[in-house]
Amino acid sequence: MMDDIAVGDELIYRVREYESSERVRVVEIDERKKTPRYVIEFLDGEKAGTRENVPGSRLRGRWADVDRYDALMAHWESLEGYELSEIEEFAVGRVFILLIPEEIAEWLWSPVRWTTRIHDSVGLEKLIGVSAEDMLAQAPGFTLDGDTILSPDGTLRVAQYACRVNPMPVLDWVEQEEKEYQEKCRKGSPAVSWDNKPYTTDPDWECERYLEDGRPLHELLRSWCGQRAVTLKERAEAAEAEVHRLDMLIENLFDQMKSKGFKQAVEYIEQSYVKERITAYNYRTVVERPLDPSEIPVRVEYRRAPRWWGY
């Protein structure tokens, strides 16, 4: 909505964002309500001479700036062709919160949802490894007042690049989220009803929510971080090499103990060592569905009968 509108001003009129601009003149300002409305007169075309009472949101700017405004709206309209899925929206929002400060770049809600406005091209390149100019070559966009505007497709790419460059904060957040889901799927979660009464959610409902929303989001973020990224791969290989070295030392230690007559103790320790080994398959937090009452093992406890004195 424009500010400082006066009677006699010639303005740009559009009923909707992407309709044609029409030239109108303000002939009266209706201030009977808290938000003023404007009586306008159309100056061109079939509507010339007719008047309407319209809200200020339909008045888009001075008619002298109509060419620049039309070009800008054409740019915005060109970004409407790509939509993110709901899970992609959650993932992009989380990556921007964790990795991209607002003073460098921010995603926009209007006029096109999930577009990105890059304020600091140099700063963004340090975060994602790609400059704003290269992003414009990969995804639709345009420049506006010195900033770069990217389409939703470009926003998705920015999030993916950021995860590849700096994956650990995202992976740490995913791990923490999975631990929280794990507890909710076991015990439910404290909540407050519409009438302000506390209650605990059903574990089955929490599990269904995790399967529909949580797990797809976590797996998408993991794929963006890249499980085969160079730094993570090097750390995994170094950890495996160290585990192998320790295995050799422990085997030598076991042989030494057996030769000294501690065979039974060595067998017990060896079984525990193998059984409780931490691997990549059991290290990740596992979110399981809650057990049905019929699946819970029955535990039988025996109690001694009371002893009555004198009998």
Image: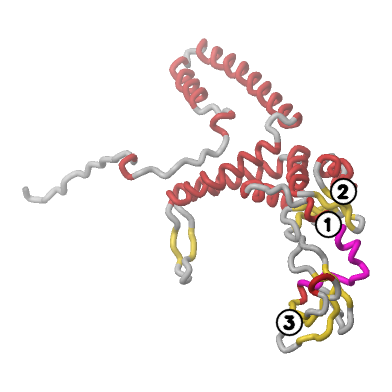
Instruction: List x then y, in percent, for residue 33.
Output: 71, 86
Pointer 1 residue: 103
Q: Amino acid at mark 3?
A: Thr
Q: Which residue, as the protein is rendered here, is positioned at the far top?
A: 259
Instruction: List x then y, in percent, for residue 109.
Output: 73, 59
| Residue at x 73% of width, y 82% of height | 35
Instruction: List x then y, in percent, for residue 210.
Output: 52, 47
Q: Is residue 92 left or right of residue 29?
A: left
Pointer 3 residue: 35
Q: Secondary structure at mark 1?
A: loop
Q: Classify 277 as above or below 164.
A: above
Along the line of sight, the residue nearer the viewer: 27 or 49: 49
Image quadrant in which you'd find residue 69: bottom right
Q: Is residue 199 left or right of residue 105?
A: left
Give how far apart the Cα atoms at labels 1 and 2 are: 9 Å
**For the stretch drawn in magenta, what is the main secondary structure?**
helix
Image quadrant in which you'd find residue 226: top right
The earlier-in-sequence mark between 1 and 3 is 3
Magenta stretch bounds: 58-73
Q: Secondary structure at mark 2?
A: helix
